[in-house]
Image (cartoon, rainbow, N blue to C red):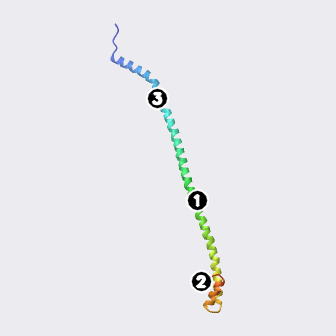
Amino acid sequence: MRRKKSSRSIFRDLYERRRREGRPQLIQLESLTRRSRTLTRVFQGTLQTWLLATARDDVNAKLESITGRLQLLVSEMEGFEAQREELVVWLADMDARLSEVDQLTGNTCEKLKQLQVWGCFDMTYI
């Protein structure tokens, strides 16, 4: 006759059997956990690299746009500066001519005719 096992013995045997059966699964789970952590770090690094590249591309595009607008403004400013220099010369010339006209004798009409000869004054509007 076989002796009946105690509840404690049954539970211990069951526990040992489950532990043996679960050991390979536990090892596999630990391996998967390590792999998951590695992949997470790789993914974060890749994502971070992609985000930095995207941000860099956005910044470069904005800088190119701003640079283009600044170059246009500088070009316009140089044109205005050239016109200003031409006007300074023209005004100096006009000042000299007006000084000459002031020194002329005669009436205002004769002075206006002299300005017209020099191309300084258009009589068609008078």
Mark identifier at residue 14: none
Residue on which the image places disc 1: 68
Q: Earlier in the sequence, mark 2 or mark 1?
A: 1
Quarter of the image where one finds residue 64: bottom right
| Quadrant containing the C terminus in the rendered view | bottom right
Q: Residue at x 53, y 41 (%)?
A: 46
Query: Viewer-nearest of labels 3 and 1?
Result: 1
Q: Is residue 2 left or right of residue 110?
A: left
Mark 3: give few (<14), some (14-19) or many (20+) Cα within 10 Å. Answer: few
Q: Residue at x 61, y 65 (%)?
A: 75
Secondary structure type for disc 2: helix
Quadrant of residue 1 within the rendered picture: top left
The numbered disc on residue 29 is: 3
User: On residue 124, which mark appears?
Assistant: 2
The vertical placement of 121 against 3, above or below, is below
Q: Between residues 114 and 3, which one lies in front from this camera angle?
A: 114
Question: Disc 1 residue type?
Answer: Gly
Residue 56: give x, y in percent of width and height: 55, 50
Q: Position of residue 65 (x, y in %)?
A: 56, 57
Q: Is residue 21 above or below residue 33?
A: above
Which numbered disc, 3 or 1, marks the residue that appears first in the sequence? 3
Residue 37's x, y, as percent?
Answer: 49, 35
Taking the spot 62% from the left edge, 92% from the top edge, the residue there is 107
Q: CA distance from mark 3 to mark 1?
A: 57 Å
Question: Regarding mark 3 in the picture, which secondary structure is present there?
Answer: helix
Regarding mark 1 in the picture, which secondary structure is present there? helix
**Residues under labels 2 and 1: Cα distance?**
45 Å
> Between residues 47 and 123, which one lies in front from this camera angle?
123
Give the amino acid type for the residue marked by disc 3 in the picture: Leu
